Image (spheres, rainbow, N blue to C red):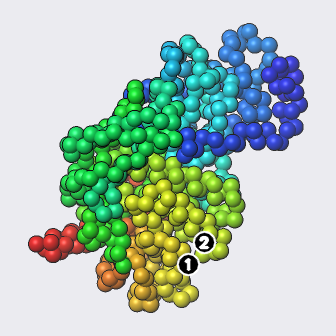
Amino acid sequence: MLERSSVAENALQALHDEDYDRPFNLQNLNHATMVFTGGRETVSLDGDWNFCVDLLDTGLRQKWYAMQPAAPIERTEPWDYDPYMGETVPVPSNWAMLKEKWYFFEGSAWYTRPLDLDLHEGRRLVLRVGAAQYDCKVFLNGVFLGNHYGGSTPFFVELTEHARAGRNWLMLCVNNSRTRDRVPMRNTDWFNYGGVYREVELFDLPQAFISDAFIRLSGDGERIEIDVEANGAADGEIRVAIPELGIDAMLHLDNGKAHAALAAAPERWSPESPRLYDVEIRMGEDFVRDRVGFRTIERRGTDILLNGRPIWLRGISVHEDDDALGKVTNETDLRRRFAHARELGCNFLRLAHYPHHERAAEIADEMGFLLWEEIPVYWAIDFANPDTYRDAENQLLELIRRDRNRASVVIWSIGNENPDTDARLSFMCGLADAARASDPTRLVAAACLVNHQKLKIEDRLAAHLDVIGINEYYGWYDEDFDELGVIGANSAPDRPVVISETGADGATGGLGPEEGLFSEAYMAEVYRKQIETLRALDYVKGISPWILYDFRVERRQNIFQLGFNRKGLIAADKATKKEAFGILAAFYGERAAAEKREDR
Ligand code: GCB
């Protein structure tokens, strides 16, 4: 208790006030405060930050963020933590991976670091946090600037008003509690890695800057459409150049927004030819750039058309998970992932079940992979709760704003295996509308369940999707494999179906049995049977089996799982391939060869 505290206005308040956290849940750092960062110079704030886990939220109750730095000998109040000294952790990281005693920690944790600034008249300072799981509150020099909800999308906060020349202190309070109202909620089939686990950067911007730029090929493929938004300027000129296409156009800002549709015939981006163009945008002192591919994607009947031609998605699902790093990813990890996907013969990846690091889509753009990107509207989230909807929609809009210049991204997925209730239907229709309003150039999907009673593809949401994702585990959770054939025959969807998940656990390296459930042999047999059945269904326009690598999850505790979902085609070491890898690779090889023959 801070009896002598001048900081806690009422020391007892720190003990008795159970609404202590209410003022800190504004969720004011959201899609509306995003900044376009392509091509900008940044200062990295990665590295060691002071750190403290705070199970009881003592920091918010005692107001640790309001403490002034001082030598311990000079302190006159018995604070329970000193943010300016003590233990440090690296950013980015997940605390579960740093110390055994933090492995299961769920709650708040404090990150503090100094920020030495030269301030320049007329410049604005904006902080970007790549991702923090799940609620992140930001304080600068003791002032609360806002918080962000959602564990896998970036957020931005302007520091200008409270920054001072010289030393500043930046504090982040990150909370990864699993609650009923969050997205996802309490129950998932992946590990709840807490922490600031993507890069933290500082941007020094002019008074008026480009906050958003959306660049794409029009639906008819004849024009390049550009939308630009400005922060700090209502009118003025914006210059857009795509030198390799001879485009150099002036756009006029009206109420902070500009739009252009420019006749152009760019070479089309495709997996076979992932052509990207430099796009440069200038507004006064501000300058941004991006590398953009131009292609069309649409559905017609049960077909998915890329650049007007039917495409079959040879896919694989992936989590962001690493045995040693948790949810932290890096260039090596991502490159290895795509190399394995290439070795499998994939042209498509499902990035499940939340937005992955933005580098994934940049690399996919360069290498020529199509992507399904997703938000964690997973299982039975609180569909009737308007706050939950607001959070889900915000995560979707943040993902779209972050990645909508990536040609590789062809599908926005708005959910996974949700129950077919009225509340869910209206929640998901809201998300589908929001996705289409903010990006009319891509397909909207969700991973749905089959109707197990009727043995049929039937979900009321399907009518609102462009692509029906189906997760089915015949041969695994559903043991009567023959039912898959019955479902296939009973169903006549009017739009494309992608089997967004199927698979079986197979434990490697002496961990698994020789045969039966959890053996590699059984897993391989499930793959053989699935492929035989699915290839015969003409409305199935792709598959992304579950999953590329084994991944950590605490639901899985039998003697073969030991805390891992073992459905990976490759073990958690990201090196040991299971028998099923070769079976899927052979199928994809055969499909790709057949498509090439048809092309000729
Ligand atoms: C599913 C879920 C996925 C799980 C997987 C499994 O249907 O969508 O998150 O990990 O099944 O292995 O059970």
Q: Nearer the viewer, residue 464 or 117?
A: 464
Q: Are marks 2 and 1 in contact (CB under 8 Å)?
A: yes
| Residue 517: quadrant of the picture | bottom left
Q: How far across and down, in percent of the image, does residue 516 sit?
A: 42, 76
Q: Residue 80 location, x and y as percent?
A: 75, 26
Q: Where the C terminus falls, by quadrant?
A: bottom left
State left or right for residue 84 relative to residue 357.
right
Q: Which amino acid does label 1 sit on?
A: Arg
Mark 1 closeness class: few <14, some 14–19, many ≥20 residues within 10 Å: few
Does label 2 or label 1 sit earlier along the sequence? 2
> Residue visible at 75% across and 28% down?
63
Q: Is residue 199 above or below residue 537?
A: above
- Give residue 425's mark: 2
Q: Which of 352 and 286 is in front in this view?
A: 286
Q: Mark 1 points at which residue?
A: 460
| Spot occupied by residue 235 in the image (x, y as percentages of width and height) | 47, 36
Task: Decide which of 492, 336 is in the foreground and name it.
Answer: 492
Viewer can see residue 458 = yes
Name the amino acid type tagged 2.
Leu
Q: What element carries label 1?
A: helix
Residue plotted at (55% across, 52% down): 395
Q: Residues within 10 Å of mark 2 (few under 14, many from 20)?
A: some
| Residue 509 in the image: above or below residue 245 | below
State whether residue 565 appears in this view: no
Residue at (80% x, 13% y) in the render: 76
Q: Residue at x 64, y 41 (%)?
A: 28
Q: Is residue 20 left or right of residue 101?
A: right
Judge from the rendering whether residue 324 lies leftward or rightward of residue 245; answer left or right: right
